[in-house]
Image: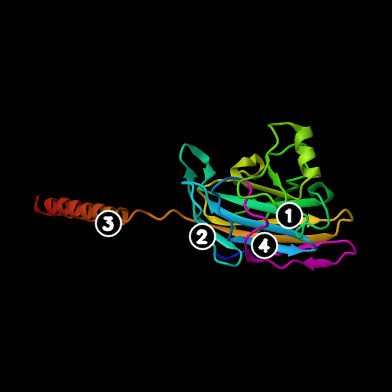
Amino acid sequence: MKLKMIAITLLVAGGSFLAIGANAANVTPDVIMGSGIANGDFTVGSSNNVEIGLRAKQRFPPANIFNYDGVNTYNFQAGSAPGDPNRPLWNFEWSINSDLDGQSGRALNQLSYLLRLDTDPGAGTSFFEFDPVNVPYADNAIGDNNTGNGGGAVAPFLNVLAYQDLIANNNVAQNSWSMSFFPALLFDPDVAGLYTIELFAMGQDGKLLAGTGINVEVSAIPLPAALPLYGAGLAVLGFLGWRRKRKMATTA
């Protein structure tokens, strides 16, 4: 299968393209979106005092398993979650820190963001795009550079005022999502392929500040070891049956 190349670039003011480097790292300050979720194995891009992180993770069964190549690719098997045929066995997780050194006082809502989800399992890409932070309400975990593991605040369900207050007074947002959360993707968890996910942060002037991207390689479900032997056994029995019938026909 031909691997997609991640183009971590975006057209910025002035019509030029700006490339954003990425590397394997923890995110700052920690994983704040749930207790027991380990930090690490993120593909991180940081510049202009902004940090952007992405990774994929095994979701079913729940575990801190990332199957990461150390560069930008995560590998999981195709298949659906128990009891939910539309949900894959893996999630993708994102992290945004709009004030990495804690000195600028730049809150989350002072930047804009672009999350791009690839809908094409083949060699090409077709992106579904949106801002995951600047929306009326989201269940994002919100905090600052002092928030500890699992300590992110989540606004009460559909409480727009509470959510807007959180993103106006904090600089860290994180979440863990499944591709199946977005009906527009028409995502099939049983299809093997390669999916690209990208996340960018832009200033008020539209200039790209930081970004990163990952590949999620979904492999076909391997056949159980016994199935090839079972198939071979059926073939042998079929051949013997055909041979017996032919012998009876010739002696009749």
Q: What's the CA distance linking mark 2 and mark 4?
A: 16 Å
Find residue 49 and report its horizontal and vertical position in percent.
78, 61
Q: Which residue is mark 2?
A: 67
Residue where numbered disc 4 is placed: 44
Give the residue at x 85% y 56%: 203
Front residue of 115 and 210:
210
Specify how the rendered protein is coloured: rainbow
Mark earlier in primary sequence (2, 4): 4
User: Which residue is at the front of the view, 121 or 14?
Assistant: 14
Asked whether the viewer can see residue 123, the reply is: no
Does residue 8 belong to the magenta stretch?
Answer: yes
Q: Residue 115: x, y in percent?
A: 72, 51
Q: Identify the mark nearer the N-term, 2 or 3.
A: 2
Asked if residue 12 lies left or right of residue 83, the reply is: right
N-term mark: 4 or 3: 4
Label 4 to label 3, Cα distance in Å?
45 Å
The amino acid sitting under disc 2 is Asn
Which residue is at 57% across, 67% downward?
70
**What residue type is disc 3 on?**
Leu
Residue 251 appears anywhere in the view: yes
Query: Quarter of the image containing the N terminus?
Result: bottom right
| Secondary structure mainly formed by the magenta segment | loop
Whether label 2 touches label 4, CB < 8 Å = no
**Residue carrying label 3:** 229
Mark 4 vs mark 1, CA separation in Å: 11 Å
- Secondary element under disc 3, as helix, strand or loop, is helix
* Magenta stretch, residue numbers: 6-33
Q: Which residue is mark 1?
A: 97
Tell me the distance, in whole angstroms, between the alpha carbons under discs 2 and 1: 24 Å
Disc 2 vs disc 4: which is toward the camera? 4
Amino acid on which disc 4 is placed: Val
Label 1 is placed on what type of residue? Answer: Asn
